[in-house]
Image: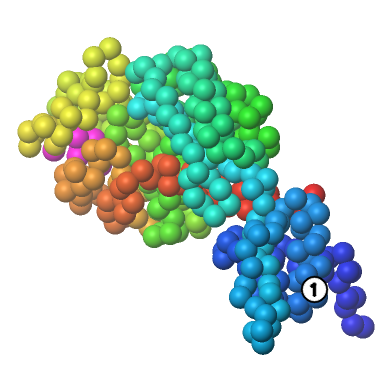
């Protein structure tokens, strides 16, 4: 028995999706070019363009091909309509709140920044987030379909709310980015912590690794089979309280090592990166030893192919970390992160663009 043929509705839906994705890639095409690109007839391409124009997704650009006088018919160029909207790519970090509006081509069409205190309270971060999103959207002049948010704090997987753990150096009190951005995003608001987004950006280079983020704060992301593993509540990789080897050979929590070495910012558990990088050989060795203990725990429980070291000071101490892990019974290759320029924002942008394109091609 031959399988049933697909319905006309399904065929039209798939054709429309192919047309939209072709325009996302090429920005503008005529109906004849769409037909050649997708491998469909010109009438089929024309019908799809008409349907998509009726839905407000495709528009005539007003540009025409050269034609007439023996050169064939004049063709009209079509592109995605401005009303298809943008995605909000958002980062909440100690340096401030950044909101970008990404269009369907992956271009940043607007950007707004608001500074916040260190540490900050949830109410101040919420106000900064609201103001930055409003400014970016006003500048973009397009509606937002969704938002993707990075926060330099643990994130509850079920709700998207930020979780304040002991010794967390950044936010004091809870922040709910979903509630803050929902009125402006017009669609889903996806929230995750900054280390997971940095790991997302590193996935093009590896599929099974642990991303160790060593900066003002401490974190780890576990990537297995190309997927970031978040755990039951979303708190996988919170390594600040992992027991490790501290100064004098005592077992201490990882975060306490920096207090004992005098490397915390005044009145905070945030690590003083400048002071750490200016430390002597003994200080670097002590930190490398402490990080080595954390690596041993990660390798034992996650079994990654390699350890990727990122953050503002981690790559600078890669030799000390390697030396401390050389005697481990179970080892993984240790390398610095390949993406060093705004890795968190790169991960957020990639997810925002992917979700925006999927939202546009989805059948209403």
Which is more toward the observer, 208 or 113?
113
* Residue 51 spot, x, y in % from top left: 81, 60
* Residue 173 spot, x, y in % from top left: 49, 15
Give the crowd class for mark 1: few <14, some 14-19, many >=20 residues within 10 Å: some
Q: Is residue 251 visible?
A: yes
Write the start and end of the magenta stretch as one range.
Answer: 285-292
Rendered view: 352 above or below 290: below
Look at mark 1 in the image and give the residue it sits on. 44
Residue shown at the point (45%, 31%) measured from the top left: 112
User: Residue extending furthest right?
Assistant: 1
* Residue 174 spot, x, y in % from top left: 52, 18
Does the magenta segment cover residue 329? no
Look at the numbered disc 1 and give the secondary structure of its residue: helix
Q: Quadrant of residue 187?
A: top right
Left or right of residue 96: residue 158: right
* Residue 343 spot, x, y in % from top left: 38, 45
Residue shown at the point (51%, 14%) measured from the top left: 123
Q: Quadrant of residue 46?
A: bottom right
Residue shown at the point (34%, 39%) measured from the top left: 213
């Amino acid at each position: 028995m031959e399988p049933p043929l697909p319905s006309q509705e399904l065929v039209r839906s798939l054709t429309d999706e192919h047309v939209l994705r072709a325009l996302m890639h090429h920005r503008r095409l005529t109906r004849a070019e769409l037909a050649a690109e997708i491998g469909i007839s010109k009438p089929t391409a024309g019908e799809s363009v008409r349907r998509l124009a009726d839905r407000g997704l495709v528009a005539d650009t007003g540009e025409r091909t050269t034609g007439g006088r023996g050169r064939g018919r004049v063709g009209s160029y079509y592109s995605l309509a401005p009303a298809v909207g943008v995605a909000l790519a958002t980062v909440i970090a100690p340096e401030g709140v950044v909101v970008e509006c990404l269009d369907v081509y992956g271009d940043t069409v607007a950007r707004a920044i608001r500074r916040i205190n260190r540490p900050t309270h949830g109410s101040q971060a919420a106000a900064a987030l609201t103001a930055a999103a409003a400014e970016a959207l006003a500048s973009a002049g397009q509606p937002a379909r969704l938002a993707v948010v990075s926060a330099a704090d643990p994130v509850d997987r079920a709700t998207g709310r930020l979780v304040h753990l002991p010794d967390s150096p950044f936010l004091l009190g809870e922040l709910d980015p979903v509630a803050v951005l929902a009125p402006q995003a017009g669609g889903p608001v996806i929230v995750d912590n900054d280390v997971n987004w940095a790991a997302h950006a590193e996935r093009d280079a590896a599929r099974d690794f642990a991303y160790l983020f060593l900066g003002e704060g401490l974190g780890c992301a576990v990537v297995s089979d190309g997927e970031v593993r978040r755990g039951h509540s979303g708190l996988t990789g919170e390594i600040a309280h992992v027991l490790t080897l501290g100064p004098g050979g005592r077992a201490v929590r990882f975060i306490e090592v920096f207090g004992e070495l005098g490397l915390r910012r005044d009145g905070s558990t945030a690590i003083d990166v400048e002071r750490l990088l200016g430390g002597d050989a003994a200080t670097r060795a002590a930190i490398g030893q402490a990080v080595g203990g954390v690596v041993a725990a990660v390798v034992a429980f996650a079994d990654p192919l390699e350890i990727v070291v990122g953050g503002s000071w981690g790559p600078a101490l890669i030799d000390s970390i390697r030396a401390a892990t050389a005697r481990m019974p179970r080892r993984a290759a240790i390398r610095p992160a390949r993406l060093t320029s705004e890795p968190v924002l790169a991960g957020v942008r990639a997810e925002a663009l992917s979700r925006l394109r999927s939202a546009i091609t989805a059948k209403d």
